[in-house]
Image (spheres, grey):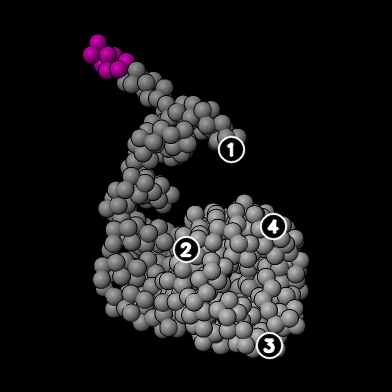
């Protein structure tokens, strides 16, 4: 009897313990509170309530699932992972538990475990495209392309051909390319183009493929198709254009390719500057300056401050001898790009051509402050030297020439002009001779430089050598000017060959472009200097 009483008491205690451990009502209450905290984004409150719910039912897989999410939200990743594994063990047929476990495996790069979870899920839920897409992603990471292609075909049957499917095929094809399996890659690329011709990146992929195979014509056709592809964004199109033409500059087809590309851009983006600038460059290279100017102006309609379009426009003005337009466009460009020396250069040239030398000097002086290129700086100072001479400021002219020769001792134009202007002033004639001789050494058949050298020799009193050099200059010149014959006459006069001197002065008068003293020389039959 005593033994029976002990057994009954033990059973009562066990029942009381179980009652304390499993209380469905309290479990449900705390689970509900946990959900309330979750929806209020109260992570800590949610964790406390879900953990309490588990204390009242240790096998509550729903609380485990929710706790997994909350642990993850506060970066308790390992605890979250353990919690979802327990939930799956308790409810292995729950789709959502399995998917969350699979995603943990994927995040931990445990891809084999992910596949073990997701393959059965996909078989069980064959009409779930998102689940199938997740499996495809991991198969691609694992480079299991055979299985991936099978699953992609299944996905295509579910959702039809679209950019999502094409993206997967493109990944496989690129991998085949990297592994040297080019035939397999081409088959997939062609399949993508067949099922989804407007997939935005198929043309880029085929461009790369054909380029690698050396089929540049086909590669370029894909570039044009890419520009025409409505689903490919403009910036990508612009980038592949730059990529292609950075590499194609030496190709004999580059001009024609640029022409096709420019027209494609204009057709697809008529209100964007890019196509017009491409064609401006094309026409400029073809010396079709009217067409280049037209395209440059079109580009400026859509971007009034476009540097390339402005530069092409002023260069066209120069080549078309339209100085009025050059002055207008160059001065406007200076306002837009006040630190770009090239526009000061063109503005300075335009005023020089209009015989407004002071205004021209102003632009050249301002522009040279922004020049960093040695060659361009020499061009600025060379022009300034000539301009300062033309306004009677020879000292400033000579300073400008000296700056040029310090940077470029063999600048032949400056050597000649500097020497000639020194000879006109009868100053530093030995230096003038040295510079003029160097100019002839650099360009021995230049009639202008020979004339300068002859004149310097004349100023030094070396009339015989001066005659030799002047005869060479006249023989080499296609159309000698009046001052050439006047100089020759002066030299002959000093050699006591007055009749020949007068004869050359007469020719000088017929030619024009002579000194103010020529009339007096002819009237009196003698030399005046």
Q: State the separation of the CA atoms marked 3 and 2.
A: 32 Å
Residue 47 visible in the shown view: yes
Residue at mark 4 to residue at mark 2: CA–CA distance:
23 Å
Q: Earlier in the sequence, mark 4 or mark 2?
A: 4
Cβ atoms under marks 4 and 2 closer than 8 Å: no
User: Where is mark 2, residue-wise?
Assistant: 434
Residue 234 image offset from top left, x and y in percent: 57, 68
Q: CA distance from mark 1 to mark 2?
A: 93 Å
Q: How many neighbours does mark 1 have within 10 angstroms: few (below 14), some (14-19), or many (20 or more)?
A: few
| Number of residues whose C-alpha sits closer than 10 Å to that of mark 3, classed few (under 14), some (14–19) or many (20 or more) | some
Above or below 320: residue 420: above
Residue 99, horizontal then vertical, whole percent: 40, 50
**Location of residue 507 by image quarter:** bottom right
Horizontal side of residue 348 vs 262, given as left or right:
right
> What are the residue bounds of the magenta stretch?
2-10
Residue at the top extreme, as displayed: 2
Q: Which mark is residue 506?
A: 3
Element class at badge 3: helix
**Residue 426 pos. (x, y %):** 60, 62
Q: Name the residue carrying label 4.
A: 393
| Rendered-image quadrant of the C terminus | bottom right
Mark in front: 4 vs 2: 2
* Magenta stretch prevailing secondary structure: helix
């Amino acid at each position: 009897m005593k033994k029976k009483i002990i057994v009954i008491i033990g059973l009562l205690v066990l029942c009381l313990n179980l009652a304390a451990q499993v209380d469905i009502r309290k479990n449900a209450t705390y689970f509900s509170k946990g959900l309330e905290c979750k929806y209020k984004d109260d992570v800590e409150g949610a964790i406390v309530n879900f953990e309490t719910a588990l204390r009242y039912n240790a096998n509550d897989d729903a609380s485990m699932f929710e706790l997994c999410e909350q642990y993850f939200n506060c970066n308790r990743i390992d605890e979250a992972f353990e919690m979802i594994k327990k939930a799956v063990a308790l409810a292995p047929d729950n789709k959502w538990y399995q998917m969350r476990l699979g995603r943990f495996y994927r995040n931990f790069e445990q891809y084999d475990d992910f596949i073990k979870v997701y393959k059965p899920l996909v078989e069980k839920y064959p009409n779930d495209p998102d689940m199938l897409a997740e499996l495809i992603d991991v198969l691609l990471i694992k480079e299991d392309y055979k299985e991936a292609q099978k699953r992609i075909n299944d996905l295509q049957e579910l959702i039809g051909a679209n950019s999502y499917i094409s993206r997967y095929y493109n990944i496989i094809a690129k991998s085949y390319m990297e592994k040297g399996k080019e035939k397999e890659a081409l088959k997939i690329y062609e399949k993508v183009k067949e099922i989804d011709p407007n997939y935005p990146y198929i043309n880029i992929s085929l461009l790369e493929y054909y380029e690698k195979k050396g089929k540049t014509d086909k590669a370029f056709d894909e570039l044009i198709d890419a520009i025409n592809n409505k689903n490919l964004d403009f910036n990508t199109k612009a980038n592949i254009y730059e990529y292609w033409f950075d590499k194609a500059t030496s190709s004999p087809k580059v001009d024609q390719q640029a022409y096709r590309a420019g027209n494609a851009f204009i057709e697809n983006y008529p209100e964007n500057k890019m196509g017009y600038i491409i064609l401006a460059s094309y026409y400029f290279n073809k010396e079709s300056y009217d067409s280049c100017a037209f395209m440059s102006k079109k580009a400026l309609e859509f971007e009034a401050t476009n540097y390339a379009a402005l530069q092409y426009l002023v260069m066209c003005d120069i080549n078309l001898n339209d100085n009025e337009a050059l002055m207008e466009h160059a001065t406007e460009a200076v306002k837009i790009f006040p630190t770009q020396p090239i526009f000061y250069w063109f503005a300075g040239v335009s005023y020089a051509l209009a015989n407004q030398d002071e205004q021209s000097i102003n632009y050249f002086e301002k522009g040279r402050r922004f020049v960093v290129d040695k060659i361009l700086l020499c061009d600025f100072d060379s022009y300034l030297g000539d301009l300062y001479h033309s306004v009677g400021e020879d000292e400033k002219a000579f300073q400008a020439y000296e700056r040029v020769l310090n940077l470029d001792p063999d600048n032949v134009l400056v050597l000649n002009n500097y020497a000639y202007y020194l000879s006109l002033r009868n100053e530093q004639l030995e230096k003038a001779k040295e510079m003029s001789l160097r100019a002839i050494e650099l360009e021995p058949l230049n009639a202008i430089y020979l004339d300068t050298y002859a004149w310097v020799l004349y100023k030094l009193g070396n009339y015989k050598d001066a005659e030799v050099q002047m005869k060479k200059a006249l023989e080499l010149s296609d159309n000698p000017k009046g001052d050439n014959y006047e100089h020759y006459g002066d030299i002959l006069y000093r050699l006591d060959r007055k009749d020949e001197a007068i004869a050359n002065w007469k020719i000088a008068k017929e030619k024009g472009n002579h000194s103010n003293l020529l009339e007096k020389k002819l009237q009196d039959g003698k030399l005046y200097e």
